[in-house]
Amino acid sequence: MKFKNIGKKGIISLIKDDLIHIRLVYGLEILGLNADNYSLRLTETIFQLVGIRIDNDDFFEDYMDECRTILNMDIFKHPELLNSMALSLYKKLITEYKTQKHEK
């Protein structure tokens, strides 16, 4: 599937960036720095590019919960974990896209 000319590789790249950002924000919070104002809103951008409605709170929370599992992974020592997780999240997004498309 090709979404808004960005394609699968582009979406997966954005997902990886989002996961790394989640780790960064969490690390800053551990250091006592409030990083809430530095949200890149990548997840919302990814949803829009794929064509998923952001108002689906249940799916959004499930997706974010899965994203947060990156906090338990050493992606710098094992970068394949980041690739695997990004691909898994991409597949989850595509499944939701197809579900929402059939609901219309």
Image (tube, rainbow, N blue to C red):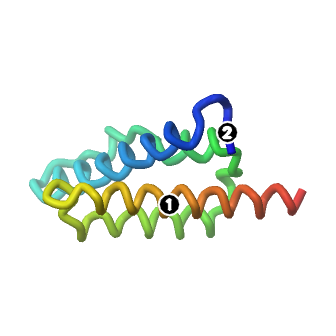
Q: Quadrant of residue 26?
A: bottom left
Decide which of tag 1 and tag 2 comes sooner along the chain.
2
- What residue would you read off at disc 2? 2
Residue 32 placement (x, y as % from top left): 12, 54
Q: What element carries label 2?
A: loop
Amino acid identity at mark 1: Leu
Residue at the image point whose x is 69% and y is 45% from the top: 1
For residue 37, the mark is none
Residue pointed to by mark 1? 89
Q: In this view, does 27 lie to the left or right of 97?
A: left
Q: Which residue is pictured at 39% across the width and 47% down the height? A: 18
Work out whether residue 97 or residue 43 is closer to the camera in this orientation and state it. 97
In three-dimensional space, the C-alpha distance between marks 1 and 2, rounded to whole angstroms, equals 16 Å
Q: Where is residue 103 in the image (x, y as percent from the top left)?
A: 87, 62
Dot 1, how many residues are within 10 Å of its Cα: few (below 14), some (14-19), or many (20+)?
Answer: some
Q: Are marks 1 and 2 in contact (CB under 8 Å)?
A: no
Mark 1 or mark 2, which is nearer to you?
2
* Left or right of residue 25, residue 15 in this image: right
